[in-house]
Image: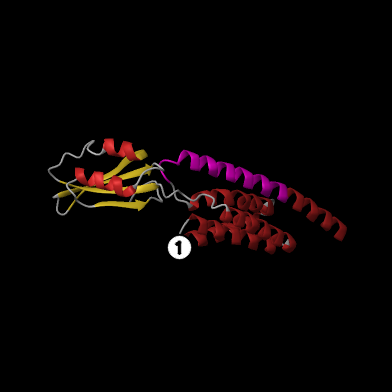
Amino acid sequence: MFDNLNTQFDSLVVIALVVMISSVLLGIALAYFYMFIKREDGYVSDFPWTMAIMPPVVAVLIIMLANNLAAGIAVGGLFALTRFRSNQRNTEDIAYVLLTVVIGVIAGTGYVAFAFIFTLFMMAVILVLYFLRFGKTSEKNLALRIVVPESLNYENLFDDLLKKYCLSYAINRVRTIDFGTLFELTYHIVIKKSTKQKEMVDELRQRNGNLTITLTVQRFNQVD
């Protein structure tokens, strides 16, 4: 009896290791593809982490819940509790929550040794991603806010300067401020390596009447 259990466990470990490694590689490949697509628009730096971590987590969950309806219903309840009762700061935190749930499910089904293997595997994956600074956005992705007077025609006013100093740029929002006496233009820009920010701001100030210009690091593809 115990020989059969050991044989089944060894077979499960081999299958799970193959699945985990394959799913991590697929997740990282998809994450790199996502970063390539979003390299100019910008993206939440935590999201590639989530894309790399989630596939092996979900894959192992599927393996462990195969042919176990009761466990599947229980995990569904846990997911609902996590979704509506917790307030995660970012997508990476949600992946960590799911990871802990999966570890609990594995241990709860009696595969304690495999729970240790899976935990160590995921810790190693996360540690490698951490040291590689995986998914970190460049500081060259910036949000540019330019305040212009109401009387100034701002359309295409700064295009030549932005082409001069930026690899790419796109206007995200135009809004009125100070009771409609001023306009605030918000751009997402990717500046060139050779760009000196002070020089760029000084030239922009000559166009907007020396009103406020703000440069901030852009972490999202949309500016609030």
Tell me if 177 is positioned left or right of 164 in this view.
left
Q: Which residues are magenta?
A: 16-42
Which image quadrant: the N terminus?
A: bottom right
| Residue under the point 20% across and 44% down | 206
Question: Residue 34 colored magenta?
Answer: yes
Picture quarter containing residue 38? top left
| Residue under the point 57% across and 52% down | 132
Three-letter amino acid code at the position of disc 1: Asn
Q: Which residue is mark 1?
A: 87
Q: Position of residue 60 (x, y in %)?
A: 66, 52
Tell me if 131 is positioned left or right of 14 in this view.
left
Q: Position of residue 133 (x, y in %)?
A: 54, 53
Judged from the image, the secondary structure of the residue bearing numbered disc 1 is: loop
Is residue 1 in view? Answer: no
Tell me if 15 is positioned left or right of 102 in this view.
right
Is residue 127 in view? Answer: yes
